[in-house]
Structures are given as C-alpha cells and as structure tokens.
C-alpha cells in the first residue's frame, strides 16, 4: 500500500501495476481429514500488502493449490510492476 495525500492507503488492484507477482507468495496447504485447504501468504513487502480471504478447499493438495494460484495471480500479463 502507498500513503496518499488524504491519509488513506491505496490497496493494489490485481489489474494494476502494483499487484505483486505470483512468485512473491507462498501457498500454504493443510490437510483436514479427507480435505485439503490452501491459502496464499505474502513473502515480500509488496505481497504482504495484499489482504485476501482466499482459502481453496479440495480433495487433494494439487486440487487446492491451482485455484488458489489462479485467484491471486495478476490479472494482466506483461504489465510493468512499480513496487
């Protein structure tokens, strides 16, 4: 987030230039009985700015990781990042 003149913080948009790259997140998977859950955790200062409630649930570890990656991935490719 960046401080702005009015004192409010700007939250990066997944379609904008400040959204962190997918590589800036760790994806934590946990087994809960017969189900798995996966959620992103920011590794870099830029990625830690993102507040997300993403938690994918599935029957296998792989089944939960891919949707979590798709949800948190930047929405426009080849866009220059500024943070």
Image (cartoon, rainbow, N blue to C red):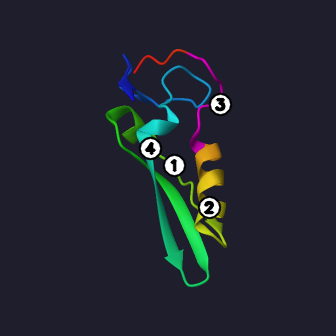
> Whole-Å distance between the Cαs marked 1 and 2?
20 Å
State yes or no: residue 74 in magenta. Answer: yes
Q: Which residues are magenta?
A: 72-79
Q: Earlier in the sequence, mark 2 or mark 4?
A: 4
> Whole-Å distance between the Cαs marked 2 and 3?
21 Å
Residue 24 location in percent, x, y? 42, 38
- What residue does disc 4 label? 25
> Whole-Å distance between the Cαs marked 3 and 1?
15 Å
- What residue does disc 2 label? 62
Q: Residue furthest bottom?
A: 33
> Whole-Å distance between the Cαs marked 4 and 1?
12 Å
Q: Residue at x 40, y 28 (%)?
A: 8
Estimate how packed mark 4 is, as few (under 14), some (14 to 19) or many (20 or more) residues with alpha carbons within 10 Å: many
In this rendering, the label closer to the viewer, 1 or 2: 2
Residue 52 got which mark? 1
Residue 75 got which mark? 3
> Whole-Å distance between the Cαs marked 3 and 4?
15 Å
Residue 67 location in percent, x, y? 66, 52
The part of the image, by quadrant, that contains residue 56 is bottom right
Estimate how packed mark 3 is, as few (under 14), some (14 to 19) or many (20 or more) residues with alpha carbons within 10 Å: some
Q: Is residue 76 left or right of residue 25?
A: right
Q: Earlier in the sequence, mark 2 or mark 3?
A: 2
Secondary structure at numbered mark 1: loop
């Amino acid at each position: 987030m960046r401080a702005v003149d009015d004192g409010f913080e700007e939250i990066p948009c997944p379609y904008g230039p400040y959204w962190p790259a997918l590589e800036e997140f760790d994806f934590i998977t946990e087994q809960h009985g017969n189900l798995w859950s996966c959620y992103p955790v920011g590794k870099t200062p830029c990625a830690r700015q993102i507040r997300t409630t993403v938690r994918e649930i599935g029957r296998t570890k792989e089944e939960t990781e891919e949707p979590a990656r798709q949800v948190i991935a930047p929405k426009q490719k080849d866009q220059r990042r500024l943070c």
